[in-house]
Amino acid sequence: MTTFWLVVVLAIALGWPLGHYMARVLRGGTAPLDVVFLPVERGLYRLLGTSANGGMNWRGFVMAFMFANAVLFALVWVMFMTQDALPLNPDAAPNMKWDLALHTMVSFLTNTNQQHYSGQAQLSYLSQMVGIVGLQMITPMMGLAMLAATLRGLFGGREAIETAEGAQAPAIEGGERDVGNFWRDVIRAGLRIMLPLCLVWAALLTSQGVPSTLQRGADIVPIDATVEMKTQHIPVGPVSAMVAAKQLGTNGGGWYGPNGTVALENPTPFSNLLETLALILIPVGCAFMVGPFTRRRKLTALIFGTMLGLSLLSGLGTIWLENNAPGTAAAIMEGKEVRFGPDASAAYAALTSQTSNGSVIVMHDSLAPLAGGVVITNMLINSIWGGIGGGVIQLLVYMLLALFLAGLMTGRTPEMFGRKIEMFEVRWLALLILVQPLAILGFTAITLAIPSLAGVSNPGAHGVSQVLYEYTSAFANNGSGFEGLADNTVWWNVTCAIVLLLGRIPVLVVPLMIAGSMARKRVAPEGPGTLQIESPTFALTLAAVIGILTVLQFMPALVLGPIADHLQLAAIAAASGG
């Protein structure tokens, strides 16, 4: 419990100045340390053959986003399938099969890092450093760029956003709006936000004993001479850099297959605090960024307050459920590292699923059933803190839907920041909401209907939870798993790759398209009849809409999975007197 509260307090204390800094970086104009970063940025613009001066409408922004993803898609996929012939492979990692390489590439391209492989055994140093860590640095900044463009669109375009405070925004209506420059946003965010934070975190983790080397690991003689294994290879590498990127970028994954449970990846209490804090630091910063970026300070209070309330409810609930599960104290410790214990493990599980991170220090398959249900629910909501950029975008989607429903209930035309929400926007919002249950429940039903495809390690309700968790994790771009699942098969690799893309591309593109549509509309002045969204009443409405659109529509699946699993364990404990 102490760890959870300490992380929340530190995230708020550091996230507030970070959010204001992020707003200055992405708003345009002068920003801190221009003398250091501008020459590097100009060199990157020349290398890419682009300019930072030209603006883009929403279509141009989306096309640049899709083009960048397509190039990275091809390069990294080929790298994984040919790594045996490439340099920096001292442990002789073999080439990946096409389906595993496809899933791994899509997983990291979508800022998910769902792993159907063990990194220390199946990836070379080059693949880890360039393919994995490269995507871990770039893809979260793509999400942040999409958030900045969406906010610009919702407030009338870059001209309106960048107008000096107190000045009159340009009165332009109709036609396409400039929502920013994709290349400029990604490069500035990467150089000025992600890279400095990663350097600081990597140095701190290295000081705690996390490996940071390009040398081959040692071969040692096991202490127990009776085992058949005469020597054991200890894989190392530039681990601290990857761990810093995976935690700060809401990436997840890990250098080692068992992730943060491995002592080399998370060796001390301080390293665990650093890694837990990093889970939510930049997502909290994104919430604090909205106010200074849009110059609507109360909007930050609405977004941050809603996210914080849901986070506390989820985090404290997970810790309590984990400590009060049916069974003995020994059963509660199943799947947990003794050095972390139940509280720190449950807090980490809650926070890693509140974001789209998915790294683990506890095997989620061994969580108490209801605690596992909360973790699944966190991912279904996907905007408690969410991924970098994506979490706030998802909350904006819920806000648009809440405004539409509130307008229906009060008999008013729904508006957001003075711009009407009309049939075009509502249709696309409805489609966006429907994609989630169709993808998750559809593939879950097919997989469970054909046992040979599922590969579950537990029959009955827990097996349902394993399959539901895997697809929910993929769609939420989270990446964690219930493990115990034989997921390195063509079926799992291909279907999860599809769900990964469905959970990333539409969730970023459709809101930007809607923002581009709303940016063209006439702005109606606020009056007595305007629905005030920056208020506690609307925050409660927003939370209710989130609950209805996520928890309730997935309730039958949750009943068949974690809730039924809990009831079965409770019945066994009662029968045995436990």
Image: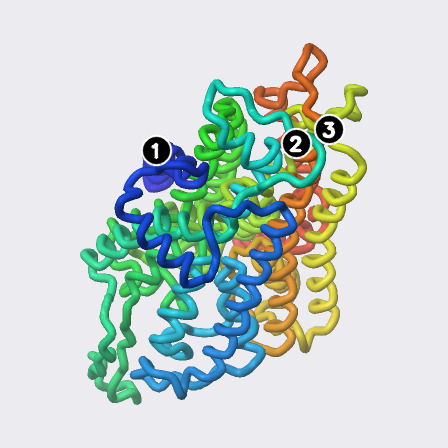
Nearest to viewer (mark 1 / mark 2): 1
- The answer to whether any part of residue 103 appears in the image is yes
Q: Would residue 455 appear left or right of 137 to someone viewing this image?
A: right
Q: CA distance from mark 3 to mark 2?
A: 22 Å
- The answer to whether any part of residue 326 appears in the image is no
**Where does label 3 land, which residue?**
420
Nearest to viewer (mark 1 / mark 3): 3
31 lies above or below 408: below
Per the image, label 1 sits on a secondary structure element best described as helix
Residue 17: which disc? 1
Residue 535: which quarter of the image?
Answer: top right
For the point 27% across and 81% down, which residue is it?
A: 233
Q: Position of residue 423 (x, y in %)?
A: 80, 37
Residue 461: which quarter of the image?
Answer: bottom right
Q: Position of residue 378 (x, y in %)?
A: 55, 46
Per the image, label 3 sits on a secondary structure element best described as strand
As shown in the figure, which amino acid type bears the numbered disc 1? Pro
Q: CA distance from mark 1 to mark 3?
A: 33 Å
> Nearest the camera: 416 or 30?
30
Residue 208: which disc? none
Q: CA distance from mark 1 to mark 2?
A: 30 Å
**Where does label 2 land, which residue?**
544
Q: How is the image coloured?
A: rainbow
Quarter in which the N terminus is drawn:
top left
